[in-house]
Image (spheres, grey):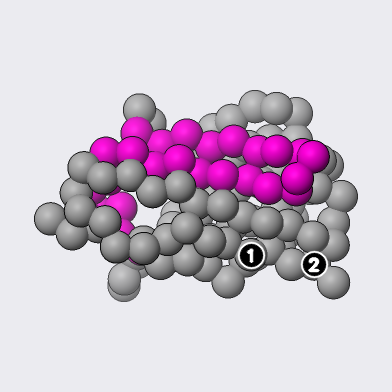
Amino acid sequence: QVQLVESGGGLVQAGGSLRLSCRVSGIIFRNNDMGWYRQAPGKQREFIARATSGGGTNLADSVKGRFTVSRDNAKNMVYLQMNNLKPEDTGVYYCNARLNAYVEGYWGQGTQVTVSS
């Protein structure tokens, strides 16, 4: 059974920081690209960051310079460090695991991040 469990969300003031974690089980973690997505109220889910199976990282332009993504293959964990948070970063953050860009992969249940102004 594949499970992705996010944690670390919460309420923070603008300019603050949060670190999201995603614990993964039921798949060969090191073979999967691990992504973070965000869904703001009334909007579609959008890509935020990815830590690839090859060791690379990608970030959406909106979070470059503020967010970093990392993974620990020994612990089956992926992290999203979010600094200098802005109210527009508010939303539900989802963890995703996929083998490649041609499959949707697996999703976690999401963790709420709320940034107050």
> As drawn, is 64 to the left or to the right of 87?
right
What SS does tag 2 mark?
loop
Span of residues in magenta = 66-91
Name the residue tied to disc 1.
5
Is residue 111 left or right of 1 when viewed as pictured? left
Q: Which residue sits at x=33%, y=44%? A: 17
In the rendered view of the protein, which quadrant contains the C terminus?
bottom left
- Residue 67 can be seen, yes or no: yes
Residue assigned mark 2: 2
Task: Let me know if residue 55 is in the magenta part.
Answer: no
Q: Is residue 32 visible?
A: no
Badge 2 amino acid: Val
Whether residue 42 is situated above or below residue 47 in the rendered picture? below
- Give the image location of residue 64, x and y in percent: 38, 31
Q: Which residue occupies 85% across, 56% down?
A: 27
The three-letter code of the residue at mark 1 reads Val
| Residue at horizontal 75 percent and vertical 48 percent from the top | 76
Answer with left or right where residue 7 lies relative to residue 51: left
Image quadrant in which the N terminus is located: bottom right
In the figure, residue 60 lies in which quadrant?
A: top left
The image quarter containing residue 40 is bottom left
Question: 19 above or below 38?
Answer: above
Q: Residues within 10 Å of mark 1 (few under 14, many from 20)?
A: some
Tell me where residue 19 appears, x and y as whole percent. 45, 47
Furthest-left residue in this view: 117
Element class at badge 1: strand
Residue 60 or residue 92, whichever sits in front: 92
Position in image of residue 95 (x %, y %): 59, 57
**Was residue 67 drawn as part of the magenta stretch in this picture?**
yes
